[in-house]
Structures are given as structure tokens and as C-alpha cells.
Image: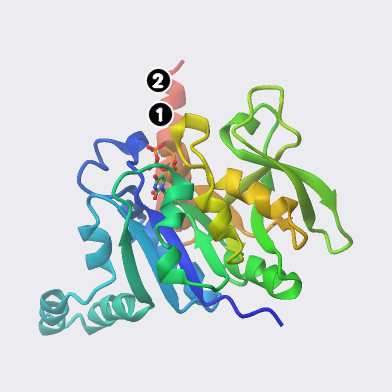
Amino acid sequence: MTPKVRKAVIPAAGLGTRFLPATKAIPKEMLPIVDVPTIQLVVEEAVRAGITDVVMVTGRNKVALVDHFDHAYELEHTLRSRGKADVADAMERISEMVRLITVRQKTPLGLGHAVLCAREAIGAEPFALLLGDDLIDNDDDPGIGQLARVYEETGAGAIAIMEVPPGREHMYGIVAGDWDDAGRLRIRQMVEKPKAGTAPSRWAIVGRYVLPPAVWPLLTDTKPGVGGEIQLTDALQGLAASDTGLYGVQVTGTRHDAGDKLGWLKANLAYALKSDELRAPLIAMLEDMVASAKKAAG
Ligand code: UTP
């Protein structure tokens, strides 16, 4: 029987250069989606899928991340003394959500390297990997839980995939293989950011994975690849070639790339449109803004 997936790695040590200067002093994973930091939404997804322990890979500026998941006694006390016990309770719940370990990635040498920094903290167990700037919005069935089920059924690694529009393949890790009867893609080929016109398919990897411990030696042996970084995709090729294999799973839910400016703006709008408080005034505001922008553009 395969063990249950209880632990997760969340890398949050990238430089976040696309969001400078916002990310000069805070990690991009702390940028809010409406009023909740992106990383909290990611941790909540993991918790809803049964994860109890999170290993967060942090770099410079880790203080805000660690503080966010810790108690803030003064704040909680002040809120209570001002009659805002409900807000204080909500703050307390964040600090009790999960057991958190942080490990340091001293130099941002790539996603593969960031994951490798969590090796000792994870040990010989399967683990979930959730990118701290990627969101999969599904209130009923968290994306990472859908992958954990595939791992628990098959013993093979599982990664979330989505079909991207033609011409956008070069922005992603791309996979190709054979579809099985359960609608999963048994991955045979993986390429990180293929050059235009060379992608083997339009199935792109999105930031959710469940990986078996067999990935560790593969990651250790991975040499720097595209951009001089240690690429996770390169190590996953070894898993795909092994007997247990690697599956691509089309997870259900809305995916937002909150590590990209437009993706982050879209995520903010999508979450705000789900809010009973914000929906109506936001729609009115957007209609006004669009009408004025169109008028100004002639
Ligand atoms: P990205 O490539 O989106 O992050 O990595 P980045 O390098 O910070 O972004 P830009 O391009 O400079 O704006 C995806 C995830 O992997 C983490 C990032 O924090 C992000 O959550 N990461 C990336 C690390 O933890 N370490 C790395 O060396 C690289």
C-alpha cells in the first residue's frame, strides 16, 4: 500500500524580478490576492487536501513569510480590546493552520535546487509540491488532493497539466505521452521551455506535483539546464523513464499564475468577483473604467 501524502514543500525563495520594486523587501508570495497573501491561499489548499506539515523554502526576505504563519500576540490582543474578536480569531487560525518548517535556499539556483533544499526535512516519504505563486481555485476538491489520489492509487508521481494555446508552449515545461483509460497522461517526454515550433505537445506543467522519494537521487544528479538553473523538469524526466512512471493529470479548478503581473491582476479580479461584498461594486467600477478607457482610445 502506498503511504498517505502528509507533507508538502512550498518553494518561495525566487527573486521575483517580474514584480520589482514590490518584491524588493518582501517575497512575491506575500503579494495579496484581494486581502490574503498568495502563499496563504496555497497553504490552505494543501491543508484542505490533508497536508499536516509544510516545508517552506525561503530566501532573503523570509521574515514576512515566517511572521505571517506565526502568532501576532500584540495584534490579536489589540483587536480583542477593540471588540474585533472575530478578526483576532481569524488571525489566530492562520498561525495554527499547519506545522511549518522553513529551510533556506542560500542562492536562487532554480526550482529543482529549491526543492532539493527540503530533502532532509521531508525524509523518505512521498510529498506534495506546490509553487507558492501559482493558484488553483477549487473550493470542493483542492488541486493538490486530486494529484495525491493518483499517487495513492498508482504509487507513481503525478503532476498537474493544462493545455495552453498554440504559440505559448515556450513559456512552460511541456509533456507528452499516452493517455490511459482513467484519463491520465503517462508521461514519456518532457521539455523545459521548448524553442518555438519544437514542443512535443501543448500540455504544460502547472505548479502542483506529488512526488515519490525516488525523485531525490535524480534531483541530486541534475546538472544546471535552461538559464543555468537546476530545473525540476530535468529530474522528473528520470521518474517518467522509471518503471513506476509519472502521470500528467488535468486537475479541475481555475488556475492563476500569480507570479506574472497580468495573471496576478486577473487572480485579484476573479477572487474579488467571488466575494458577496465586492462583486456588485467591482462590476460597476470595471464597467465605468472600461467605458472611459474605450472613449479615451477613440
Ligand atoms: P519563478 O521562476 O516563477 O520565480 O519560480 P522567480 O524566479 O522568483 O520569478 P521572476 O521570474 O524572477 O519574477 C517559481 C517558484 O519557485 C520559487 C519561486 O519563489 C516561485 O514560487 N523558486 C524559484 C525558488 O524558491 N528558488 C529558485 O531558485 C527559483
Q: Where is residue 241 in the image (x, y as percent from the top left)?
A: 74, 51
Q: Tag 1: residue type?
A: Ser
Q: Where is residue 33 in the image (x, y as percent from the top left)?
A: 38, 54
Mark 2 nearby-residue class (10 Å; few <14, some 14–19, many ≥20): few
Label total for image:
2
**Given the current orientation, which residue lies at the most extreme right position?**
181
Please tell me the numbered disc located at residue 292. 1
- Say if 18 sits above or below 271 in the image: above
Q: Which of 255 and 124 is in front in this view?
A: 124
Q: Quadrant of the N terminus?
A: bottom right
Q: Where is residue 141 in the image (x, y as percent from the top left)?
A: 62, 71
Q: What residue is drawn where x is 10% and y is 76%? A: 74
**Which element is circle 1 on?**
helix
Q: In this view, does 288 lie to the left or right of 95?
A: right
Q: Where is residue 210 in the image (x, y as percent from the top left)?
A: 60, 64
Ligand 1's quadrant is top left
Does any portion of residue 276 appear in the rendered image? no
- Say if 195 sits above or below 94 in the image: above
Q: Do the residues labelled 2 and 1 touch (CB within 8 Å)?
A: yes
Mark 1 nearby-residue class (10 Å; few <14, some 14–19, many ≥20): few
**Which element is circle 2 on?**
helix
**What color scheme is it?**
rainbow
Q: Is residue 52 left or right of residue 174?
A: left
Q: What residue is drawn where x is 61% and y is 40%? A: 173
Give the labeled residue for mark 2: 296
Q: What residue is drawn where x is 17% and y is 79%? A: 76
Does any portion of residue 220 appear in the rendered image? yes
**Given the current orientation, which residue lies at the most extreme top position?**
298
